[in-house]
Each structure stands twice: as C-alpha cells, then as structure tokens.
Amino acid sequence: MIDQMIMQFRRFITDEYEKGNDRGLMANEPSAKSFTTLSKSGAELQEAVFGPLKEAIGNHRRILISPAGGLTQLPFGSLPTNDGKYLTDDYVISYLSAGRDILRFGVGHAGKAEESLVIADPDFDLHVERPKRIFQLRGRHKIESNAEQQKCKALELKQLHIRQSGDLKRSSLRFNRLPGTKEEGKQIAKMLGARLWMGRKAMESKVKAISSPYIFHIATHGFFLPDQKRYPNKEPNESISLSFMGDSITRLSNTQLENPLLRSGLALAGAKTWLEGKNLPAEAEDGLLTAEDVSGMNLLGTELVVLSACDTGLGEVHISEGVFGLRRSFVLAGAKTLVMSLWRVPDLASAILMQRFYYNLVILNLDRSEALRNAQIYIRDVTVGEIKEQWLSKRILKRLSGGNENVMHDLQRLKKSPDNRCPFTECIYWGAYVCQGDIGRLSNNP
C-alpha cells in the first residue's frame, strides 16, 4: 500500500510539472486543484511512513534513513505536513544505502585525493565521419592497407568490450543539450578551483580513468531503465547484452536477467550519437557511463560526488543491499558521500540550488546534509529580485537559453515578474535531491 502511495505522490509531481520538460528551464505551473491534490497525497504519505516514527524520534533533529523497497524513491524532506510546512523544515534528513555504511563515517581516506573535477554540458552530438577505406592494388584484387585494417580492428575490439543493457536501443531515451549546466559547471569549478570538462572533453574513457577527485561534480542527463519483468520458466532473451551470454554468467544468475547495474547511468559526450546509430570516436565508447562502469572506478579518496542530473538516485531494489543503481555504485567505488536526485529537476533551479549548496559547504563550512537542506530551503524561498542580477542578466540569459527561443521567452517572462515573487516554491524544484553517506564537514581540500 505504501509503495502505491509513493508512486502516486511522485506521479502527481512529475506528471503535473514535467509535461514537455526534460530538466528544462521551468516546470509547468500547477493548477489550484492539482496543488491541493498533491498536498493531500503528500500529507497522507507523510503520516503513513513518518507518523509512526515521531514518538521514537522525539526531539531529535537529525535523522539517518536506510530505506528499503519503494521508500528508496522517496525524498522524505519533500513530504508536506498538516501545518503547511515540509519535513525538511523540522529535520535534517540524510540516507544510507545500507545500515552498515554508518561504520565508514569519520574514517580516513583509503586513497589519496586529487584535484576536484566538474563535468558539465557534454557534447551529446559528438561524432566522427566513417573513415574512408584505403585500397592498394595487388594483382587483380583490391585489399585494404594494413594501417586501415588495424584501425578498423581496434575499433571493433573496443566495441565488443562495451557492456550495455540489451534494452537501451529499444528505449525511448533521448539526450538533448542542457545549456544551463554549462553555466552551473563554470561557476562551481571556479568556486572549487576545480578542473572543468565540458563538450567533447567529457568522454567516457577519460571519465572512467580518473583517480579520486576530491569533489566530483557531474551535471548532465541521468537515465534509468525500468526493472525487467521476471519470467522464471522462460529462457533468457537473445537480445540481452552480448557480455552476459557466457555460461559463467548464466550459472551465477537464476533469474536469467542482465546485471541491474547496466540499467542506470549518466549521459556523456556522444550519447545521443550512439543511440542514433552514428559513429563515435573510440575514446567516447558508447557515451553512456553505466552504474557498472562507476563501480569499477577509483574513488577511494573522493569526499563527495554530486550528480546534478535527472533520475540519478533510482535503480533496481535488492533487499539488504540498498539500491543497485548509481547510488550504490558510487559507494562501491569508494566515494564517502553522494548527492543525487530522485526525479527530473528543472535546469535553472538546479543550477541555483547547486551553487548555494557549495557556498554552504565550502564558505560556511556546514556539514554535507545541512548544506543541502539549507540550499533547498533557500531555493524554495528565494525571490526573483534576489536572483535577478546574477542569474537573469542579459549575458546569463543568452547562455542559459542556448539559442532556444522558447527558453529565452520563459527567462524573459521570469525576469519581468514581480521582484517579490518566489518562483521555485514547489517541491519539483528542490525536493528531489538527497544526501547519502557521510554527513560530516569536508576536510581540507588537497
């Protein structure tokens, strides 16, 4: 019953606010009727999942939650209360992928941290033209040159080693450019003194090769493929990824399903090109950094990973093992803390929220969960007048619109609205982000 209530609460948010949006500039404004329905649904859910805990919680303000089942898709802080507030107004809530993760809190680095890294605005359309064949005449036959043969062979071998879900090509995934992430990336990299990879620099092979950036911020699309249906008496589908057709893998899995870590990930340079069946540079691989790829990365010295993307916190649920998606993979890779979203977040609000989060973290030296909570309350209450100079100037409007006339129209309309208007009050703008892992303050940046 609770799982159904969670699905309904999320559906009220995403269906009402995201029609026609893909982490876009602004969400659609809800009607009064829809807002009332959402508030009622959220309040009922809050009473069902949190009400029974209030007596045990007492006066404690900080709560760590290790959710299971459908609760992994619920950001508790976004739940409204009967007095017109939200749980985040009364509590600092953070999460664990499993209860044993608390044993890692305060433990020193297992590896050496390197310079922080920010990835933003990947070139999803990155592509290369198919190389022209070079021929040499030998007798009466045309044969490719040795150099060309070796190049083609290397590309083929590279492609064979890419592990991916068999459902990707059949999915409706589409990755359009996110111009707001470019400005977000620039501002955060400047604040952190971090490396900044944008455009074609954000290629999969380069990302997988990084070694423990102190802070790792990724502003891009996330993707999540729904759980596969289980048919215990059915043979494995031949369309499943080639890498899972070997006998050794089949013996390890009675479900005959592919690894759930292949079903969620992040879009990098060339992701759209690959989905369209076009050619990519070998360094870009398929442009999709899956959760399985992440689990093999070296983040043992990384204090914080921030996924400023959509649907990054979702994944297939396994009892006692947390969520087998991106959030679990970053723990396996060694990251101490992960901040991610549980639904799609409109672009401008996300950029402002992230900047405030890092200000709280680096300048005010708040602990990680408090820094996120403070940023969420800030974005909820911020007025047009307060963001106009920094985020709605002519120069920033041009950058945020990315040449899209509809986005520019929305930005200009927002700029002209009354200075006392709070444009991001609804939880679609701030409620999706959650903090998982170590909640302590950041140690000194290397």
Image: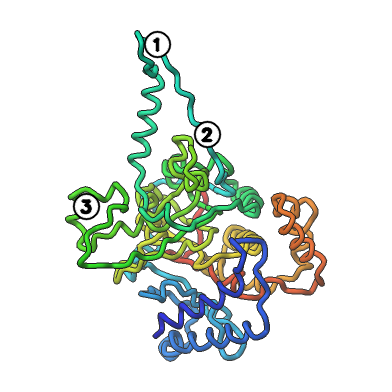
Within 10 Å of the Cα at label 2, are there few (<14), some (14-19), or many (20+) other Cα atoms? few
Q: What residue is rendered at 34% in x and 64% in y? A: 228
Mark 2 or 3, closer to the camera = 2
Residue situated in front as seen by the camera: 358 or 232? 232
The percent position of residue 202, horizontal first and vertical second, equals 52, 43
**Left or right for 388, reference 315:** right
Mark 1 or 2, closer to the camera = 1
Of the 4 image quadrants, the one containing the N terminus is: bottom left
Q: Amino acid at mark 3?
A: Ile
The percent position of residue 392, horizontal first and vertical second, equals 76, 59
Q: Amino acid at mark 1?
A: Leu
Within 10 Å of the Cα at label 3, are there few (<14), some (14-19), or many (20+) other Cα atoms? some
The percent position of residue 128, horizontal first and vertical second, equals 52, 34
Within 10 Å of the Cα at label 1, are there few (<14), some (14-19), or many (20+) other Cα atoms? few
Q: Is residue 343 above or below residue 261?
A: below
Residue under label 2, please give it.
Answer: 128
Give the residue furthest to the front: 140
Name the N-terminal-most of marks 1 and 2: 2
* Distance from the alpha carbon under mark 2 to that under mark 3: 34 Å
Mark 1: which secondary structure? strand
**Quadrant position of residue 261:** bottom left
Mark 1 or 3, closer to the camera = 1
As drawn, the label of residue 137 is 1
Q: What residue is rendered at 29% in x and 70% in y? A: 320
Residue situated in front as seen by the camera: 175 or 198? 175
**Left or right for 408, reference 21:** right
Q: What residue is rendered at 40% in x and 26% in y? A: 151
Give the residue furthest to the top: 139
Whether residue 136 is visible: yes
Residue under label 3, please give it.
Answer: 249
Q: Looking at the image, do the residues carrying marks 2 and 3 touch, with CB atoms under 8 Å apart? A: no
